[in-house]
Amino acid sequence: MSIDATGRAVLVVACLFSSGWQKEVAAKSSSPIRIIATDSGFEAPPMIAPGLRHLLFENRGTEIHEAMLVKLPQGVSAADFVAAVKSGALFPKGALDYSGPGLTSPGESIEIWLTVDPGQYILVCWNSGHATSTAVHPLAVQGGRADDPVPNESPSRTGILDRTSRSRLSSLRGCP
């Protein structure tokens, strides 16, 4: 059986798409949401869209920091949350831990993919009492859902987290 030029072109395109080439291109063209930790708080956008988000966490402080996302209950502000923690509440009632970039040494960075639902959140660092001494960062999750693409390579310090499996790093689709 002979295959003409058109047939070969269709076969090449089908092979490229089935090998994950389109994901690799999409992942390289997508910018992660940057969260920067300092010893006095966070630099991060005030709002992101719901869905699977690609986060890049950079620790520019002199101490170990993390950026845990906490979904606040309706009617509770960031100031209310901090006041509850300062008064001794381990985790204020109704708040939901959505996880986030974990403990990271000074000068290091970590990437994760995290699924977030619409609502009002804060970024908080729980390390060594930072939640009571370092400013939290309010973060609104609103708008239309749009998932960020996941990488097509096996990362060493990345993972996908969601509320139902926040305690484990999941294998990225297509990775060994």
Image: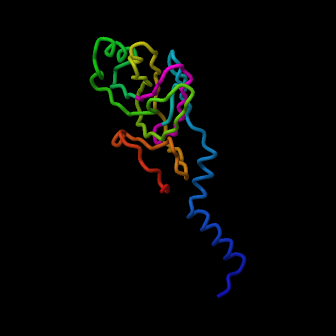
Front residue of 5 and 15: 15
Q: Position of residue 138 (x, y in %)?
A: 46, 22
Which quadrant of the figure contains the N terminus? bottom right
Q: Position of residue 19 (x, y in %)?
A: 57, 62
Q: Residue furthest right?
A: 5
The residue shown at (39%, 23%) is: 126
Name the image colouring: rainbow
Q: Is residue 121 above or below residue 88?
A: below
Front residue of 84 and 48: 84
Q: Which residues are magenta?
A: 50-69
Front residue of 14 and 172: 172
Quadrant of the image occupied by residue 114: top left
Q: Is residue 123 above or below residue 147?
A: above
Residue 58 on the magenta segment: yes
Quadrant of the image occupied by residue 21: bottom right
Q: Is residue 176 above or below residue 72?
A: below
The residue shown at (45%, 19%) is: 136
Q: Position of residue 2 (x, y in %)?
A: 68, 86
Quadrant of the image occupied by residue 10: bottom right
Q: Is residue 96 above or below residue 158?
A: above
The residue shown at (39%, 41%) is: 162
Residue 17 on the magenta segment: no
Q: Is residue 3 left or right of residue 161?
A: right
The residue shown at (60%, 39%) is: 31
Tally of numbered tags:
0
Q: Is residue 52 left or right of residue 2?
A: left
Q: Position of residue 172 (x, y in %)?
A: 47, 50
